[in-house]
Image: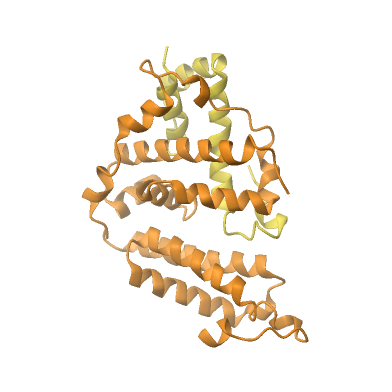
Amino acid sequence: MMNCQQATRLVSEAQERPLSLPETMALKLHLMVCSGCKNFSLQVPFLSQAMKAYGQGGEEESTAADPKK
Amino acid sequence: MDADLNGRPDPDVPDASILSDTVFLTDLRRQMLKFATLQLANPHAAEDAVQEALVGALKNANSFAGRAALKTWMFAILRNKIADTLRHKQRMVDTSSLLHEDDEDEDFSALFDRRGHWHADERPASWGNPHQSLHQNQFWRVFELCLDGLPGNQARVFMMKEFVELDASEVCTAVGITTTNLNVMLHRARLRLRECLENNWFLKGERT
């Protein structure tokens, strides 16, 4: 079973490239039993959305910072 | 542009209010310059890029509904200009400075035990519905502080990927690193950024 360091690495890399099937399976198994990494896997896409919204006037106009999927 | 930055506030002319808000413009310029300098790793190129974006945007400043719209527009111009420069220029950095800046093992051992599992007090917590935070001024202050807290190389590639929106291979070319280097840097940047946001925002409760 992969450890948390490896799991968070894959979660991060999934933002840059599609994971292979074995990687995806192993990661899913890990996330099922690890709440910390599960939370991390939800936070990483949020970081990306926040970074994209940064500088878009998010400080004063909520419309500009509308998070899209 | 100096004239614009130093203009006196004139409450009778609402259209000009943004241009005479020197605090806002000075702060915006500072933010843009910091971002451009980090991305281009060249103070002169950064000055030029910011100057161009400011002049272009200020010409149309009266058509912006408010500060947020103006800021959005200026950052959009600047971001495009930086993306363009990074895509077309040969790499501009001394890559050796990027690669051994910080010690990877040290970074990870603060978070994970010897078997690679989270230390109990480092395990990521639930953030609930974090998107609400995007509408809160204070969140963006914390976000910027957390970005500032990243080592320069990590902040640079993270913003290049997620804000300038170069793809991974373009980032590698612009910075002169391998995909493996990039993946390690982004992994660490995300771990640090999330930890900082969690400690300074999400676990403190969302403030308005």
Q: Which chain is orange?
A: B
Of all residues shown, which one is farthest toward the top?
A: A1
Q: Residue at x 68, y 74 (%)?
A: B64
* Number of marks in the rendered image: 0
**Rendered position, B141 above or below A29:** below
Residue A50: x and y, percent?
58, 47
Residue at x-position 37% and y-position 15%: B115
Residue B77, placed above or below residue B171: below
Image-quadrant location for residue B36: bottom left
Picture residue at 46% right of the left edge, 35% below the top? B191
Q: Residue furthest right?
A: B12
Left or right side of A60 for B152: left
- Colour scheme of the rendered structure: by chain
Where residue B44 sits in the image (x, y, percent)?
Answer: 34, 72
* Residue drawn at x 78%, y 86% as measured from the top left: B12
> Residue B160 placed where, x, y %?
42, 52
**Image location of residue B207, percent across then percent down:** 71, 45
Q: Is residue B5 visible?
A: yes
Q: Colour of chain A?
A: yellow
Residue B166 appears anywhere in the view: no
